[in-house]
Structure formats: structure tokens, C-alpha cells
Amino acid sequence: MTSVLDAAPLTNSLTAGKLPRRSSLWILLASWAVSAAVFAMLFLSGTVDGFNVVGTIVFGTVLYCFAIYVLSRLVEGSRKAKDRLMTALVTAAFVIALLPLVSIIYTTVVNGLPAFLTPTFFTSSQRNVVGAGGGVLHAVIGTLMVTGMATLISVPIGLLTSIYLVEYGRGRLARAITFFVDVMTGIPSIVAGLFAFALFALLFDDPGIRFGFGGSIALSVLMIPVVVRSSEEMLKLVPNELREAAFALGVPKWLTILKVVLPTSIAGIVTGVMLSIARVIGETAPLLIIAGFTSSMNYDLFGERMMTLPVFVYTQYANQGADSQAYIDRAWAGALTLIVIVMVLNGLARLIAHWFSPKLGR
Amino acid sequence: MTTAAATTIKARQRPGDRIFSSATLIAGSLILAVLAAVAIFLLVESLPAFVADPAEFSGDTTNFWSYVGPLVFGTIYSAILSLIMAVPVAIGIALFISHFAPRKLAQGLGYLVDLLAAVPSVVFGLWGIGVLAPLVQPFYANLVDWFGWFTPFAGPVSGTGRTIFTVAIVLAVMILPIITAICREIFLQTPLLHEEAALALGATRWEMIRMAVLPFGLPGIISASMLGLGRALGETMAVAMVLSPSREVIFQLLTAQNSNTIASNIALNFPEASGVGINILLATGLMLFVVTLLVNMLARAIINSRKAFSGAN
């Protein structure tokens, strides 16, 4: 520090020992340019085929980390240099996390679109289809029925439980339920599938049992804890004054909950339910175990195997026929359908939360 | 007169109140019952596996424990590897969202990371085979050439890139959102006065984070990692699709022979299983359930104990 001041006695002491503003941006661009130049030279000299964009950005960023650290250390001292280095690393961590997301969405759209756009994709099943053609109608119907039934089971149980936890539950039982609901969110999905299988295999004494309703039960096991947690958060947000006002007017507790508490928090609860549907609609493993797979339509939840979208994607990939490209195309198109459904559910849920949430006076 | 004073005024019990409150109580207890039922039904259906005839086991294994051993190893090995990759990145993302990103952007950036959690696991599987494995295979070849003397990197290198290391990368991406979400919450709970005190003493932003945020958030980071570990242990489809499995304990990360995981083994073999084979797979599922339950309970216990003393509220 002192050497800098000695060398330039006329500089303002407040700005001395600081890199100029926006210098980090310029250094980053310069590092990318240098790295791009190196890769361009490699490409032109014929050592590698094709200009490596990913390599350019990765090495450019690494170069930036070095450059900013060294420069800042020379000008600003070691403490500030470390701060700049960590800022660079933390930002890089965030960008690293976005790369797979972008890559997944990009490849799914690119690989999935051709089969996704064929006219039969949403109007026919895979029955008697060998090679190209056919569609996912049976899987879409199966997914809608299985997930719909799971929602019908989970929402009442989950909502009532969250009401119990917020409005009634005190003491040990409530604490135990809160704790185990949290623990249940971590149950592996395949274990839920095995549970549904074990339950119905024992109940109906059929060791090869496969049917859609079992899938709904398995999904409910995964879905109930999510519904409980999100509804509980929303019910807690309802101001106590509303409840007290209702009690003061002589309204019974159960009517207060039904007519005052629930309507106030309904937007948040709907958001939570939609997010939980988005979470279970992509579950593959439990449905592979208990709902099985088929290539025909099945509208009966309580009999025979039932195809669902995630299992469709898996089986198209795993059991490729002679014309393997057709199967892989269909797998990607199924994946695209799934991603679209999940993203739409997520987006809608956020919008509902945004539009209908009670406006807090600020 | 004295008797009248002793009686307390009680609200009239309406039938609606009783029905409603008992309905909520039943729903709450049902959840505990379901968790117990998962354990009981899995246990009942697994019992035949423990006394199964040696001929029922495929390969050269003769009893349940030698069958499940390599699977347990593969499950833990891949989960730990993914955790090593995911935790530093997740802490970085959480810090970025909580302390580095502009305030207005922070929430939107948080949603972006949450979107990663919404991608179905079967899509991660397709991506792992179709994009990631071919992308990393050349790096594996170089690693084996240069560091082959180091046992985990010993050859021969897999030609497809579908190794346990690729699986660990996919798992790391899948558990990033949950670890990030919890770390973010914990970092935001850091008492503002601690942060401001550090800054007022002249600390740089990184020094403030190291002195105030990270020590405060350490238990949260640990339990978030354990929740991530639970997810990685139980992840099924991505592993089943990406890994090229075998039935031994293998430490090498980059070869075509890899220890399978419990969940992936069930998914691959269940559709064709019959007789005692089903019971054996259910028994391995029971093992997985017990392990993940313990990991999750420990993680939640740490988070809950922290909540009470955090002083953030």
C-alpha cells in the first residue's frame, strides 16, 4: 500500500489503491477474448476440429479469476484481492448451476420437437406400433388419471392435517406429525412404489399385481407431505385478528376456519397443491413398479396395467426396437411433453400466488 | 352462592366443532400411520428374502447379505461423490442469491434454481446418456492416461462415458436445488447486526461472510447436505438409465464396470422379477428406506434444534 502512495504522491488517498470502476468487467471480457484467440488458433492450425465455445468460456473464466486476483493483489492488497476472487467464484457457481438447466431444456426441445409435432403423437397409442409412428395418448390419459386420483387422495388429507397443525394441534402429537412430515418429504420415490406394491400384493394375494390406483397411492405418499408443508405455511400467514374477530361475533371455530381462514389463504394453498402436482407428475420409479407399462389404452384405474408419461419415456428408451431412432425420438418427445406440463404447472402456480396473494399494506 | 362461583363458563360443544376437529386429528394421525405402514408392509414382504434358498440369487451370490453388499457400496459411493461436487457449488449459489446478487433479482434467480428441481428424473436420465456422457468421455480418457496410477482413475476407460462418475455428476445437479434452498434460508437468517458489525470494523464482503454468515450457517449447511445425501441415496431413474452396472464392489470411477445402486437395481430388475426374486428386491428397498429415514431424521433434528436458538426471529 505504502509503495503505491510513495510512487504517486499526488493521487487522492481515497481512490488510490483501487482498481478503476468497471475494471472487473473489462478484465472478464479481455480474458474471454484471450481464450477465444487461443482456441481460434488451435482451430485454424488444425489441431482440433471445430471452434470450442464451451472451452473458450470455461478457460476464459478461469483466466479471469487468476487475472483479477493478481491485479487486485498488486494494486489493492491481499484482503481485497481475496474478496474479488471469492465474488468471481460465487458468481461462477451460480452460472455453473444454470448450465445443466439450459442444456436440458435445449436438448429436450431440439430432440423432442420432430416426434412431438407428428400429427398422431397426441391422438393415438402405441398399440401394434413397431418402428416409427404411434403416440402417447395412452400415457397422457394414464398420467392424468393416476395423478388426478393421487391429488384427490392427498389434498383432503394434507389440508386437514395442516389445519390440525395450525388450528388445533398442541403438544407431543403435533410435534411428532410436523417432524415426520418433514422426514417423509425425503422418502425415496421408489420406496413409495415398493410400499404400494407390498400393500396390494398382500391385500389381493397377487404377487404380480399392477394397476393404476396403486400408482395413485404411491404418489400420494410422496405428495401428502408437500401439501401439508405448503398449506401449513399459508395458514400460518392468516392474521390472528381475523380469527379473533370471528370468535368475538360468536362464530363457531369450525365455521371460522371454513369461512374465514381458508378463503383468506386459498390462493397460497392452490399454489402449493399445483407445485406438489408438478413434483409428483414426473415420478417414474413408483409407477414403473406398481402401475407397470403397456402400449394400449386403459381407462380403468382399478384393473390392468396403466401407462404413464414418465414410464413411457423410460420404456421407449430402455426397450428400443429394430428402428431404434424412432424409439429414441419418441422418448425425447415424451420428455418434452413432461417438461412442458411441469413448467406450465410451475408458472401457473407462481402467477396465482402473485395475482391472488393478499396485498400487504406498505 | 359458593357453588355458582366455582362453576366455570364453558363454550357449548357444537357437533360441527367436534366432527371437524376429529377429522383433522384423524388426517394428522393417518400420516403417522402411513409411515408406520410403509415400514411394516416392506418388512413383512421382505422376510422371505432373508431365508431364501441360495439358488434364488443370481450370479455367484448365495445369501441376501452378499447380494445387497455391493449395492449398498454403490449407493453410498455415488451419493458421497455427488455430495462432494454439489455442496461447494450449492453454498456458492446460496451466497450469491443471499449476499451478492442485486436485491431485486435475487428472488427471480432463486426460482431459476428451483426450476432445476422441477425437471423429472427420467429427463435427467435421458440428458445424462444423450448429452453429458459423450461430453465427458474424452476427459475421462485423458484422466486415465495421466492419472491412471491413482486407483480411482485406473483404466480401462469406459468407451461410452456411462460410469459412476457421470452418475455422480447427474446426481449432483439433481440435489443442488434442495441444498441451495436450505442454505439460502439459513444464510438469510444471519443476524443483520453481526453482518453490519463486521462491515463497520472494515471487513470486506468476503471477510464478513466468513466471520458472520458461515459460522452462523454451519449447522444449516450440514443438515442441508444430509438432506441432499438422502435424495442422492434414493434417486432411481437417472442412475438406472445412465450407469452401466455390474455386481461387484468397484472403486474405479471411469471404467465400464460400476457398482450398481439399490434403487437402480430395483428399477432394472423389478419388471421381470418373480417369486422370491420380488421379495429380495423388496428387502433391498427396506434397507434403502431405513438408511434414508435415519439420514433424514438426523438432518431434520439438526435443523429443528437450530430453529429454536437462532435468534433470527
Image (cartoon, coloured by chain):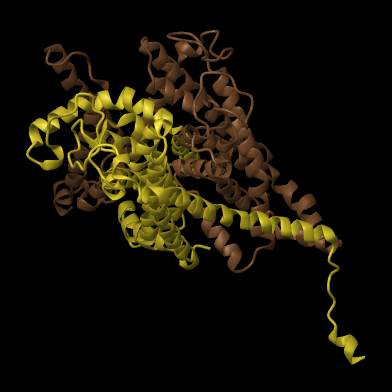
Chain colours: A brown, B yellow
Residue A180 in sight here: yes
Q: In this rendering, does residue B99 appear at all?
A: no
Of all residues, the one furthest to the bottom in this rendering is B2
Relative depth, front residue between A82 and A307: A307
Q: Position of residue B24 (x, y in %)?
A: 69, 56
**Residue furthest left in the image:** B149
Residue at 30% across / 27% down in the picture? B132
Q: Which residue is nearer to you in this view: B89 or B212?
A: B89
Q: Quadrant of residue A39?
A: top left
Position above or below: B183 against B170: below
Name the one closer to the observer, B305 or B271.
Answer: B271
Please tell me which residue lies in front, A233 or B67.
B67
Residue A133: give x, y in percent of width and height. 48, 8
Q: Seen in the image, is B285 located left or right of residue A258?
A: left
Residue at the farthest right position: B1
> Residue B152 at what x, y percent from top left?
15, 41
Give the quadrant of residue A103. top left
| Residue under the point 31% across and 57% down | B210
- The spot of residue B124 in percent (x, y) is 39, 30
Q: Is residue A108 left or right of residue A40?
A: right
Picture quadrant where residue B203 is located: bottom left
The structure residue drawn at horizontal position 18% and vertical position 32%, both measured from the top left corner, is: B255
Left or right for B84, reference A228: left
Compared with A241, B248 (above or below) is: above
